[in-house]
Amino acid sequence: MSAIDRSELDGYETLVSELRATAPVAPERLRERVLEGAPAQRVPRSRKRRLFLVVVPVAAVLAVGAALVHGFLSTGSRPSAVPAPIMRGIAHRRPVYGSAATASQSLRALPSGSQSADKAVSHQPSNAYSGYEAAPATTTPTLGMALSGNGARSSVMIPQHRLVHAVATLQVQVSRSKLSEATNSASQIVGSLGGYAQSVHYEASHQGGGSAVLTLRVPVQKAEAAIAKLGALGKLLSQQVSTQDLQTKLTHQTSAIGSLRRAIAVYEQALQSTTLPASQRVIIQIRLNNARRQLSKVRHARAGTLAFGATADISLLLTTSGHAFVGGHHKSGRFNRLLGSAAGFLGLEGIIVLYALIVVSPLVLLGTLAWWILRERRRREERLLASA
Amino acid sequence: MSDVNALPAAVRPPGRVGAPAFADVVAEHLDAVYRYLVYLTGDRAAAEDLAAETFERAFRSWRRFDPRRGAPRTWLCRIAHSAAVDWFRAEARRQRREETYSRDEAVLEESVFAEGLSAELERALRRLTPAEREVVALRVLLELDGPSAARVLGISGTACSTRLSRALKRLEEEMSDVRN
């Protein structure tokens, strides 16, 4: 017993010694009674049982964890049967307007009988932006084209003499028996034109109906041909082509590179001068470093612009008659898309939080209940022992 | 005096390898458990039954006992405490049912807590509540240290210390009352 413990008994030595001296002793009959059931040696827990107690919970946890991961991945990356996201892809592209000399175009071909069945071509006059990028708000330039009843269409013009990025969406209806064939043909068409199929989602029921969504990439120079050939796979239901002019951007980047090179040459020449004061030398050295860094950035950006303008993205939706899908005309601006994206992300966060709450709350509730029961039990014991 | 709170060499880590046989534990701690229960219940017959029940329960959970987590005496006292609380509950129900309270009258005339105990101390002990007698038994008779006694009682070390102090003070007061 420690000194602190002993100090609690200080002042009661007589009492304590009397209590200890006359402590009751267990009667012999009790000793015999208890020893009747006592084993000679303690039986150790079997190794198998111990292993079982460890392995089973670990396996259960692993199984649940793997199921959760699988569920998360499969639900997150599984393409939708209805290819709305693909169709929306165009709306998510942000056209960039250049100077007055360039015009971004969006060409939309509609089936015959629609309200825009005339061959009116409406080019929106571009504002005299001087190299600044601007979102097109609600004035997306469109080129309406009519399709004949059998799906014949006007050829789409994509500027060849300027650097542009083209995005096209086509919806083509094919017969039930030719869905797989048309899907393969589409991949072959873009392959023959120097492009490739970035993704293919094919879905067909045993009755023969179904749809296929292909995300294709072709060199922009071959985009017109590709669109024409892809449209000829069946009955063209809708066609939407957007071009984004990158020429102005490229020109600005090229001229910026030239300016920076010249500045760097001047700085380097200045630094070679022996009469340059030390303070000036430091300043020029800093400017030189900045110019070099800027040059590297602009070069990188120019390479990106060239790469972006090298290919055209084509989203092709092949459907059978039972799976007709009409893509909407998207006019949402960047702000709306941003709001939509943010709302979607918040929704996802909400789902995660809700899921966590659903999973955790019963455990918390059970824990609280157990704690409360134990506390009440202890208090009841206290009351019982204090009042008995 | 040997320190009862220290683990015997046989039960020190690595623990289970050198754990004592249950019969040895019974032989070593039966008196302590019996004393504790006598003080707690104030009834020798009940204490005997409860001691037997305590060791029966201990035997059932003997495989789960880990000497590294506490001394056998503390563990046994904890089981005895639980058994005694059940007994008190049953007694309370029985008394409510029968609406009689003749047990104390019968017990009053004989020595309950120990042979050879002075009459004043015997009576004073009877006047204490079971909770007070319990802490006296644990700390004085069984010589458990504060944390071990607190673990048996399911209260904090400070509360245990306070309860002991009050119990001893009240015991002295009751003794002087009896003398007067």
Image: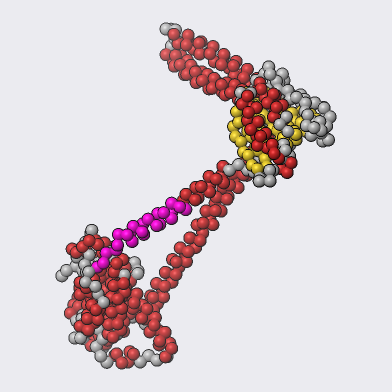
Location of residue B151 (image quadrant): bottom left
A328 relative to A302 in the view: left or right: right
Instruction: Give how far across and how far down residue B101 sits, in percent.
Output: 37, 90
Residue B130 x, y percent position in the rendering: 33, 80
Image quarter of residue B29: bottom left
Q: Nearer the viewer, residue A120 or A195?
A: A195
Task: Please tell me which residue lies in front, A199 or A157.
Answer: A199
| Residue A299 located left or right of residue A325 | left
In the rendered structure, which segment of residues is drawn in magenta? A42-64
Report which quarter residue A38 is drawn in: bottom left
From the top left corner, tell me how far across and down residue B44 is, in percent: 27, 85
- The one nearer the camera, A77 or A237, is A237
Front-most of A289 and A119? Answer: A119
Residue at 54% in and 11% down? A262
Who's the residue at 30% across and 84% down the image? Answer: B46
> Looking at the magenta stretch, what is its main secondary structure?
helix
Q: Locate the C terminus of chain A and report the quarter of the image it occupies.
A: bottom left
The quadrant of the image that shows the N terminus of chain A is bottom left
Instruction: Farthest residue to the left: give it.
Output: B1
Depicted B176 relative to depicted A66: above or below: below
Residue at the spot 30% in from the left edge and 82% down from the top edge: B49
Residue B35 visible to an observer of this rendering: no
Residue B114 in the image: above or below residue B153? below
Q: How many marks?
A: 0
For this view, does A240 lie left or right of residue A36? right
Considering only vertical position in the picture, is A119 above or below B138?
A: above
Question: Which residue, as the protein is rendered here, is positioned at the far top?
Answer: A274
- Whether residue A73 is visible to the viewer of this picture, yes or no, is yes
